[in-house]
Image (tube, rainbow, N blue to C red):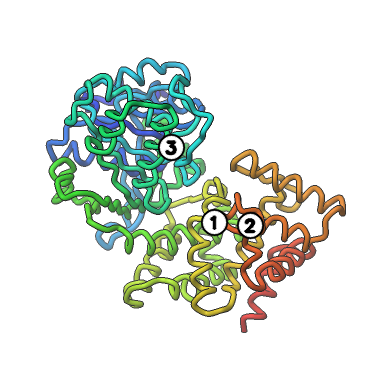
Amino acid sequence: MQKLNNNIHQKYISYPEKVLQFGEGNFLRGFIDWQFQVLNEKTDFNGSVVVVQPRGNNKIERLNNQDGLFTLYLQGIKEGQLVNEHQVIESISRGINLFSDYPEYIKLAGTEDLRFIVSNTTEAGIVFDPTDKLEDRPQKSFPGKLTSFLYHRFQAFAGDQKRGCIIIPCELIERNGEKLREIVLQYASLWNLEDEFIEWVKNANTFCSSLVDRIVPGFPTDSYKEKTEQLGFEDELMVVGEQYHLWVIEGPEWIKNELKVEGTGLNTLIVNDLTPYRVRKVRILNGAHTAMTPVAYLYGLSTVEESINHEEVGMFIKEMIREEIIPTLEGPKPELSSYADDVVNRFANPYIKHYLMSIALNSISKFQTRNLPAFLDYVEKYNSLPKRMVFSLSCLLYFYKGKRGNDSIELQDDPEIVEFFKTHWGKFEQQELAMSELVNIILAEQRLWGMDLTSIPNLESTVSTNLLTIYQIGVKEALKELFETSI
């Protein structure tokens, strides 16, 4: 059977390269690149996306082997009906491997058509690495790579104010656009770049904070064979996502003239303040995802659908949202409850196989950004601990032990974080640390949480009790005990 490429996809259209995309993963392809496809089909956007990888892997090569094409399946509720549809996405022109073809990346910086830069490098991606240098090919950090790109663009156009870019990061961190702008300017200072460049970054470029919302589980491992037979070609980059989507972009009104989303059917909003959208979405949807993952996975489950439909785990998730997350949010309670109901229904989408281990990537930083703010607000408001969130945190610490029964867990996080947990869990197993000492060390480690969690009253002792119970009798029995104490 033939593989998907231009030879077998007769509808392929070539567009000017208007978008630079940092990230080649499932989410950006199933969310951003799909939206640019819609804009090409329904407006005069007339632009394609050039993809670069923020980290080293072989997906760029696979993307180029398919001429930037991939099949997107959207499955779920659409206009009140359960819909399963698919299309080939044509908006990506090519991928550039930063490690083997860096000169092509610099060449792109000097092209006139380029206007937008988007990214999704996970919550751990927008960071400052002081070891990055301008002459590196490439820099290690995403902001370092971006600063280098912008500097070469500044040079190529001699500081022309009309050649700046609209930069829209999609990482799930608060004020992501502002944070990225700050780090770019930090690199400009570190690298002793001229004042004219700094002014060009500030005045010619528009950094927009944004919020994204679509569940994109990614490659359909379980149904790939069936879908391949349906399509009549092989597609190594096939992506499955839900029908629901929301993209909120905080930026000036004039952006609507360049992203003409009105009338396209896209649920894309350009607003003055995305804060209410962000807090609601990050705490309820993303927070529930992150909180459920260690609990459900250690329980023995594999997907979000299994988890939300499971009698005990599903009840745990729903009660946590209703009783511990929603009370921390501002806004009309009926509206928040309605959104939460929608989220639960999306979790239960029968078409979506969203694997817990795909959510588990960088779980520590995700807990810090998604769960900890609600956790702290709950403690401040009620002067007590949110017991379900505490139980989830306890499971997260056990998850980073790297074992589910006799099976190893392939932890996907910063190597230093993985090594930190490996070292201290090893000391516990060798009886060099008591459980209470282990918990104290982990909760006090500010590089994990951004603060010393032992400062929260009763948290350390409660986590120690939970963790010892999980260690001795397992998550299933520990969860039963949690429900019994909640009655």
Residue type beneath disc 3: Gly
The circle drawn on residue 396 is 2
Mark 2 or mark 1, which is nearer the start of the sequence? Answer: 1
Above or below 398: residue 37: above
Residue 54: give x, y in percent of width and height.
Answer: 45, 32
Mark 3 or mark 2, which is nearer the start of the sequence? Answer: 3
Above or below 469: residue 121: above
Q: Nearer the viewer, mark 3 or mark 1?
A: 1
Q: Label 2 crowding class (10 Å Cα cut-off): few <14, some 14-19, many 20+?
A: many
Residue type beneath disc 1: Phe
Above or below 237: residue 208: below
Asked if the residue under mark 2 is in contact with the one under mark 1, i.e. CB atoms within 8 Å, the reply is yes
Residue with the most extreme right position: 431
Disc 1 designates what residue?
Answer: 367
Q: Nearer the viewer, mark 1 or mark 2?
A: 1
The circle drawn on residue 25 is 3
Q: Real-space Cα distance between discs 3 and 1? A: 21 Å
On the rendered structure, is 455 left or right of 168? Answer: right
As rendered, which of 68 and 424 lies closer to the eye? 424
Query: Which quadrant: the C terminus?
Result: bottom right
Determine the image quadrant of residue 282. bottom left
As rendered, which of 404 and 401 lies closer to the eye? 401
